[in-house]
Amino acid sequence: MSAIAIPATEMPAEWRLPYRGTIGMACLIIAEAAIFTIFVVAYLFYVGKSLSGPTPRGVLETPIFFTVCLLSSSLTIHLASKALERGARGAFVFLWLSTIVLGGAFLFGTGQEWHRLIHEHGLTISTNLFGTTYYSLVGLHAFHVIVGLTLMAIVALFAIVGYVGRDHAPRIGALSLYWHFVDIVWVVVFVVVYVIGR
């Protein structure tokens, strides 16, 4: 009589609470998403209702290059986070600084666009409904980019002097969640302002 082999069952991995910084960031993102939703709805509601110009069709130029910069920064911050988890500090610093440069390029593009709209077309926040909703929505996003770049610059300084290591990976992961949120919001803003709103 032959013995029947019974496959050994693997014990499921022990469940652990998620990192509380990640939970906190998720809660912040949910609250911020609600705020952005209000601004997006307001933009869509008022688009085309301005009684005087300029209008979106006449003054907006689609910021393709700067959008690519911002979306690319999601990849670099993800790779930076993974590099830190592996303990590759040199790769982390390079990718982290690349993220800052790409985010900074995007912010420069936003500033350049605002300068052109104000000085060439006379569009300010008080010009008409389009100006009010445009600067409010894009400005809110730009503010979040500035916050993210400031936090990343602080991390970069600590990383350069050697104070960021593998044990900080969960914190870096939480910050990268914020940056991914900023990028996702820009996709929505881009579609609403530069595609639907024109």
Image (spheres, rainbow, N blue to C red):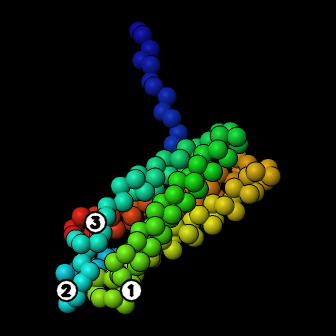
Residue carrying label 3 = 194
Q: Distance of mark 1 from mark 3, alpha carbons?
A: 18 Å
- Mark 3: which secondary structure? helix
Quarter of the figure that contains the C terminus: bottom left
Instruction: Tell me where residue 18 appears, x and y as whole percent.
Output: 56, 59
Q: Distance of mark 3 from mark 2, alpha carbons?
A: 17 Å
| Mark 2 or mark 1: whose residue is earlier in sequence | 2
Q: Nearer the viewer, residue 89 or 45?
A: 45
User: Are discs 1 and 3 less than 8 Å apart at CB?
Assistant: no
User: Are discs 3 and 2 less than 8 Å apart at CB?
Assistant: no
Residue occupying image coordinates x 59% and y 56%: 100
Q: Is residue 1 visible?
A: yes
| For residue 163, above or below residue 133 | above
Residue occupying image coordinates x 35% and y 85%: 132
Residue carrying label 1 = 125
What's the mark number on residue 49? Answer: 2
**Please, what is the three-letter code of the amino acid marked with disc 3?**
Tyr
- Mark 1: which secondary structure? loop
Instruction: Tell me where residue 177 appears, x and y as whole percent.
Output: 51, 59
Instruction: Tell me where residue 170 appears, x and y as whole percent.
Output: 63, 55
Q: Residues within 10 Å of mark 1 (few under 14, many from 20)?
A: some
**Please, what is the three-letter code of the amino acid marked with disc 2?**
Lys
Q: Which quadrant of the structure image shows residue 1?
A: top left
Residue occupying image coordinates x 40% and y 79%: 118
**Please, what is the three-letter code of the amino acid marked with disc 1?**
Ile
Q: Is residue 71 visible?
A: no
